[in-house]
Amino acid sequence: MQQGKVITFASLFSEVSNVEIPIIQRDYAQGREDAWEIRDQFLLSLSQALTAPVGTLPLDLDFIYGNLSTEERPTLSVLDGQQRLTTLFLLHWYLANKEGKYADFIERFTHLGKSRFTYQTRTAATEFFHALVRADNSGLQFAENAPDLREQITDSRWFYHSWLQDPTVSACLTMLNAIQSCFDDAPSGLYFKLCSSDSQPVVFQYLNLSSFGLSDDLYIKMNSRGKALTDFENFKAWLSGRMSQQPGAVTFGEKIDQAWTDMFWNLSKKRAESFDTLFLRFFKRMAFLLECGQSSEPAYLLANLNATWFSALRSIREGFSSSEFEAKDTFNPSNIEIISSVLDFLCSQHATREHRSLLMEFLTGSDLLGACRFYALCAFITYKKSSSHAYFAEQHAQWSRVTDNFLYTMRIDSNQVAVGVIRSLDELAPYAGNIYSYMSTVDVRLGFNEQWDEEALKAKLITLDIEWEPALIRAESHPHLKGRVRGLLEGAKNADNSGYDLTRFISLTEKTYWVLNEQVLHNYEHLLERALLSLGDYLIWQKGQRYTFCLPLHQSWRERNENWLRVTEKNVFIELLDKLNKKENMSNTLREIIQESNPGGWRELVVKDPETIRYCSEKIIDKLDNQVYLLSKTNLRGYFRELHSWVLSKRLLALLRREDGNAPFTAVTYHSVYGDEWPCIELTVSEEETFFIAHENGVWFDCHNVDEEGEPLPLPSFFKSLVDTLMHDADTVSKT
């Protein structure tokens, strides 16, 4: 091409085969929302040039710079002039459609169904320009006062909504709307006038940098004002380059810019995060999972050596370092195949709402449980792909049930544990097609030691009688159990231990739902706790002398295991369930159990007085044999009460009110304490005589008043008989 030749946009394509905006360029800027002033002025200038009288000087758009390839079909790589050329291309497209000259446009500006003017900044932009020229535009309206062109195009079947995330595509649509507004009522014949090599209303001059011995680097240094690429765009460019020599690279590129991006685009609508943020996080977290599973290092060593790397991969803060990914060889062809299989599945008709929920939990959550549950799905998908079988929803449901039971009954709180879990899932995955058969027959455990025996038993029951499966699913779905139902299974054993009674198991499950629900567990009377205590000591040991009545918590494995889950594995829980007949009468039944009971000792005091439980905000007591301290917090450093003395103080106060001045004392006050003090009853006998009475292991004593030798002073003579009368149910020995 002649240097500095005055040329039109249309005649440019008579000189070169293609015009390309290279990857080093910034996004198309004239179509940005905030560039309206520049855009409107430029379009006005173009309109005036096209409608000017014959003989008017052309609109000269100055120089454009670029490099021309030496191929058989030479491509002009534009280095300066991107904005002007893009706007001219869109204007030609619009006028050709508006004036019914689209056949001429196709002949001039396309080749083999692809646009001869393209962007290489992003794959999405490239695909958009190709799709724009080959699409059937018969459904688009170009008449005066037609709907917005942007809206019409984005509603077209050929348009991928994920393209809207590409700034160039979005800017092109904005420019087309502006062109529509400017040329809506323009006279006809402007298309051929614009293309004419004779009238030439709009021209520019071309310079080929390579002819002057100049490289692209010079331009890059001179024109570094473009917007920086996002972390995901940098990652995608790096990954595409890495994949370029691999089989299926073209297909991979199409999916990452279309179907996969569409999926993340739809997911991002429900989040305050952009689709490319979620997309990059997916790749990073998949890298974490794959690294855990494929390394040959021992779990503890891998977790320690890669602590910083794992933390970066799991972080919600974005960031991408190609050197690190290169060094780790994380995205090798084998791993890309796994990732592609997972993404293909998630975009397929087989993906359910539950699968998408797993994906969102994986992307937005911070716990390792969600990551491991998603990996279980990945392991199944990978297995099904490598086997020649089609996807079977039933098989995945069985696999998911078993693996969820394993995962929900583990404390996955470190990378080391996660590594072990992921490796165990990999070992189990080859049997995913018939997990029940495998679990019911194999003798070798593949990890998950704590829950393995229970799952093996369930698998045997299901293989013997398929009716066990829905019954087990119902029990495992209870929020306080989540997979671990060994207590209910134990309760469903036949009397001779020869097997398990399905009908009884179903009954125990339903009664568990009756009593372990939010309404009952938050009951002000604490009917469930007191009914259980009337039958036996159900409390769960925590540490030292601390026990819990149990909190209604169930989100984590730790919360479940330290509370009601362990209660369900006690005989007293099954004994209570056996006393329940109807859900509607359950509260009354619990009250009857409480009223008719006489457990004695400290349990008697708690059973008969729900306030003893209410005082314990964290539901924790300090207990050694029959000596019980009610804790307002989690230990004795917070305020606490001694159970016997507090109950006695309440009963003394009730007696005082009942006797109306005839009692042998005049006032009763209870003192809760913290630290090393004694909680005690302040008992006023007269103005001159007050006792501070504490209790310890059946012994009542004055904890403040002492004799010359430091021994507690004797309690009033009437006190022993009062204790015997008021506290006989506490099974203590009163002493003075």
Image: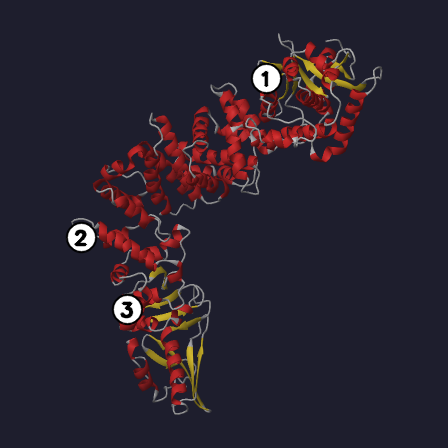
Residue drawn where x is 47% and y is 19% of the image: 247
Q: Are marks 3 and 1 in contact (CB under 8 Å)?
A: no
Q: Along the line of sight, which residue is nearer the eye, 685 or 284?
A: 284
Q: Position of residue 123 (x, y in %)?
A: 58, 24
Q: Position of residue 206 (x, y in %)?
A: 75, 14
**Secondary structure at numbered mark 3:** helix
Q: Which numbered disc, 3 or 1, marks the residue that appears first in the sequence?
A: 1
Q: Which numbered disc, 2 or 1, marks the residue that appears first in the sequence?
A: 1
Numbered disc in front, either 3 or 1: 1
Residue pointed to by mark 1: 114
Residue pointed to by mark 2: 494
Numbered disc in front, either 2 or 1: 1
Q: Along the line of sight, which residue is nearer the eye, 237 or 161?
A: 161
- Location of residue 394 by image quarter: top left
Three-letter amino acid code at the position of disc 1: Lys
Q: Position of residue 453 (x, y in %)?
A: 26, 44
Residue 407's place in the image compared with 611, above or below, is: above
**Secondary structure at numbered mark 1:** strand
Neighbours of disc 3 within 10 Å: few (<14), some (14-19), many (20+): many
Q: Which mark is residue 593?
A: 3
Q: Are marks 2 and 3 in contact (CB under 8 Å)?
A: no
Quarter in which the C terminus is drawn: bottom left
| Residue found at the far top of this picture | 72
Residue drawn where x is 37% and y is 88% of the image: 716
- Location of residue 598 by image quarter: bottom left
Three-letter amino acid code at the position of disc 3: Ile
